[in-house]
Structures are given as C-alpha cells and as structure tokens.
Image (spheres, rainbow, N blue to C red):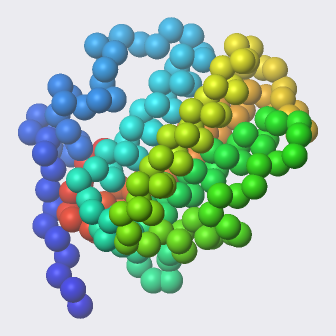
Amino acid sequence: MSEQPARWTTATVYPDMWADPDDDPRNNNGGTASEGELATLQDGLRDFRLTLRMKCEGLDAGQLARRSVPPSTMSLLGLVRHLVEVERDWRNWIGEGEPLPRLYGPKDADFHGAVAEQTVVDTAFADLEREQAALDAELAEYQDLGVRVGRERIAVRELMVHRIDEYARHCGHADLLRECVDGRVGQ
C-alpha cells in the first residue's frame, strides 16, 4: 500500500481554507455583495471556475492525470476535459441549429484521454477557456433570465443554476483528487 501525502495548506488565517483571504482571487470584490440576480449567478459561476483552476495549479502533467481510486477514471485533468465538453454541450442546449460535435470523442473519452502529456494539459485548459468564453458570450445576449432558449426551451436562469451546480459538484471532486495527489487541502 502506498504512503499517503501529508495534508497541508498555504492558509494561515483559516487553516481549513485553500488560501488566506487577502491572497484568494475569489475575494476580489472587496466584500461587496453582487447586485441583482444575474450578477450573483455570474459571480458564483466565476468563483467555482476559479476554484477548479486553483485546485490544478502547481501540478505537473502526471499529477493532473493521476486517477483517483479504481475503477474510476476521474482525474483533475479529466475533470477539466469533462467541463470542456459540458460547456460545449450547453451551447447546444441554447442553439437552434446543428449540435456542436464532442471535442474529445465518444462518451468518457474526456476522462480516458486525460493522459500525462503537457500538450494534452495545455490543450485542455485552452479548450476550457475558449468554450467558457463562447457560452458566456452567447448567454450575454439574454439579460432576461426568464427567457426560454433552444430546442428544449430552457430558461436562461435554469441553465445558469445548472452550470453552477455542475462546477460545484466537480470542485468537490477536485478537493479530494488534489488531496490525494499532494496532500493540499482547503475550500
């Protein structure tokens, strides 16, 4: 049985946190609450997106591709690639035309293809940034969160909440995956 890494954090103010409040990029609004429903949803999504990136920072390709426990194929890199596919698919939810194809192949290729190669890592993060920006731009056209879009007539509000839920769930996975990789803990 392999030895588990020691648990650690860089936080000194609150030792159960990932970073001290002054160093945490998620605390960039100076303690001011978001104004309005749309801003609140966007801020929540932004914070979970940042959390995922923070959980991946400082790791090499091998660490990012390290799988959790068998038979799971989950890894931090796999989560990034999965969220690329999810962001892309959400664009299909709001579109009326032909669906965008999957980037990494058939079901679970996002996890299976998460291999310890720097080009795979770089591509995954570039793909995630591009797909996030593309969906954000498309949704920016809708200021009314109640408007229904796409073939399924989903409300923009529902899609925003679903996006936050997806990132929140996977940030929980990322917490555990990161702790298994190098012992770093924190919210």
Determine the residue positioned at 47% across, 46% down.
126
Q: From the top left corner, tell me how far across and down residue 7 is, in percent.
A: 16, 61
The image shows residue 168, relative to residue 36, as above or below, that is below
Give the farthest residue toward the left: 12
Side (left or right) of 42 relative to 17: right
Q: Is residue 177 visible?
A: no
Residue 15 relative to residue 79: left or right: left
Name the residue nearer the viewer: 29 or 81.
Answer: 81
Residue depicted at 89% across the width and 40% down the height:
97
Location of residue 102 with respect to 32 vertically, above or below: below
The quadrant of the image that shows the C terminus is top left
- Depth check: 15 or 75 in front? 75
Please tell me which residue lies in front, 130 or 176: 130
> Is residue 113 something one can see in this rendering?
yes
Identity of the residue drawn at 27% across and 63% down: 60
Up the image or down, 64 lies above or below 160; here it is below
Residue 6, quarter of picture = bottom left
- Image spot of residue 95 (x, y percent): 82, 36
> How many badges with numbers are in the image?
0
* Residue extending furthest toward the front: 119
Left or right side of 27 for 6: left
Q: Residue furthest bottom?
A: 1
Q: Residue at x 60, y 16 (%)?
A: 37
Q: Quadrant of residue 1?
A: bottom left
**Residue 115: horizontal and vertical position, in percent?**
44, 72
